[in-house]
Amino acid sequence: MLLENIVTVGKQTDVQQLARQVSQEVFAADSIDEALEICKRVEPELVIFEQLFTPDCISKFISSSTGTAPVVVIGNDSDPNLSKQFAKMDVEFLGTPKDHGRLLKIAKKIKKPKSDPNTGNNNRFFADELAASASLVGQSPAALHTLKMIKLVAKSQCNPILIIGKTGTGKEVAAKAIHNARHKDEKFVALNCAALTANLLESELFGHVKGSFTSADREKTGLLELAGTGTVFLDEISEMPLDLQAKLLRVLQEKTFRKVGGTKEIRCNATIIASSNRSLRDEIQAKRFRADLFYRLDICPVSLAPLSSPNRSEDIELLAEYFIKTSTICPEKSNKITSITKLALEALTEHDWPGNVRELRNVIERAILLETTDKIGLSSIIIDSENADHFTDHVRADNIKGLSLIKAERELIARALRETRGQKTRAAELLGISRATLYAKVKQHSITSSSSVPDSDEEMEVSSSSESMAVA
């Protein structure tokens, strides 16, 4: 196979069969709108139209499409006038669906570079190069405002810098973006203040001299010294013990520090970036955070909006697509799962995401593990991971015994129709296929249902007759 994926627009099976001869995957669309939607998801290497679409329709498709995939029209005759019209649009015209030779030549000419998460077609994930350098995904008003603040503090001499945002909003990603803009060739070292005891935290941050405490059998260089002229990122600074907060305040004011047990003053040349998922003002009221340290940090804070914010919610779809593209959780599925259905996206956008970007990434990676097709469907979106029933539906091996591929397909289609209460458009989206394919499968498997779809788990009636389900 020469190409990875092709989108065909129309209903002729001959055209789809021809496309399968030169491509690993073929995505079938019934209409131009559906083709545009698919092209957004899979970034095809070639788009093939049937002749029933006029040059004007195809011209509108080309102007509306965000991709650069070449377009081919396959007809049932070799009309020279039509061929000239398409030639003016830089569109190839094949006179017959059996013209495998010419399509093969077209496929050989197509050179699609491998996708890189930070370049090429993936630029749509990022607002600019700085965002791409730190994988700061987002095009929403909130994401753009955050990026503006990152650039503002990065260009200044502001030190320290405070980043605030709820758990999972990407505070370390924002810190790396600041680091990349200010001194990307220097070291970036991170320390989670909630992960260590007070003594270990002090030793990690300042270092220690040999013999300063029982297990100090050698001298240790702290992160403040190790970072040099780079960046030290103090994650969840609200968890830092009060006595250590006082020592950090001295570093921020004097730009010098001593190792634990040491007497030598060491110069701190690093940029200090601190983050918190709590309100530091509330922590001051609760006597857990020093007011003087807060006012030293609170110069020009960078705030990250949660995914539940109206100004950030439009990034959910973009983040989901980015995680699908860049996930390495299942190497054998790399580049095989290329998109996500509309129903699955609806489920993602309706959730309030208390765990924010981190939670969304976990849900997408879980879906990649569970999904068996090339498109993540609603059934693979499991937000409540504690609900074991969802997992057993996917992995219960004893259900496979005695189940043929045909029977499994018939049962899956019946289940999708039941879930969507007989709405075939939604059922097709749920299954990740076109409506035309769904109608063909319903007829092939002789699936029938009454006008009212049952609410129970009882299977839809599978008739042995050849009568197909009535079109809703």
Image (spheres, rainbow, N blue to C red):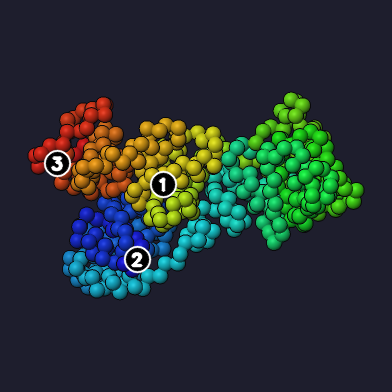
Q: Are marks 1 and 3 in contact (CB under 8 Å)?
A: no
Distance in Å between CA atoms under marks 1 and 3: 32 Å
The one nearer the camera, 397 or 176, is 397
Question: Which numbered mark, 1 or 3, is in the foreground of this view?
Answer: 1
Which residue is drawn at the image coordinates 41% and 47% (left, top)?
368
Q: Which residue lies at the image location 90% right of the left edge and 48% below the top edge?
A: 263
Q: Position of residue 413 (x, y in %)?
A: 24, 41
Q: Amino acid at mark 3?
A: Ser
324 left or right, relative to 299: left
Q: Position of residue 252 (x, y in %)?
A: 82, 45
Query: Which residue is most to the left?
Result: 465
Residue 245 is marked as none
Q: Name the front one of labels 2 and 1.
A: 1
Q: CA distance from mark 2 to mark 1?
A: 25 Å
Dot 1, how many residues are within 10 Å of its Cα: few (below 14), some (14-19), or many (20+)?
few
Q: Looking at the rendered structure, which numbered label has been put on residue 3? A: 2
- Disc 2 to disc 3: CB gap under 8 Å: no
* Pointer 2 or 3: first along the chain: 2
Residue 446 badge: 3
Q: Earlier in the sequence, mark 2 or mark 1?
A: 2
Mark 1 or mark 3: whose residue is earlier in sequence: 1
Work out how far the residue at label 2 is from the one at label 3, CA to CA, in angstroms.
35 Å
Q: Secondary structure at mark 2?
A: strand
Closer-to-camera residue (43/170)? 170
Residue found 77% across the figure and 26% down from its top: 287
Q: Image quadrant for the N terminus?
A: bottom left
Nearer to me, 292 or 91: 292
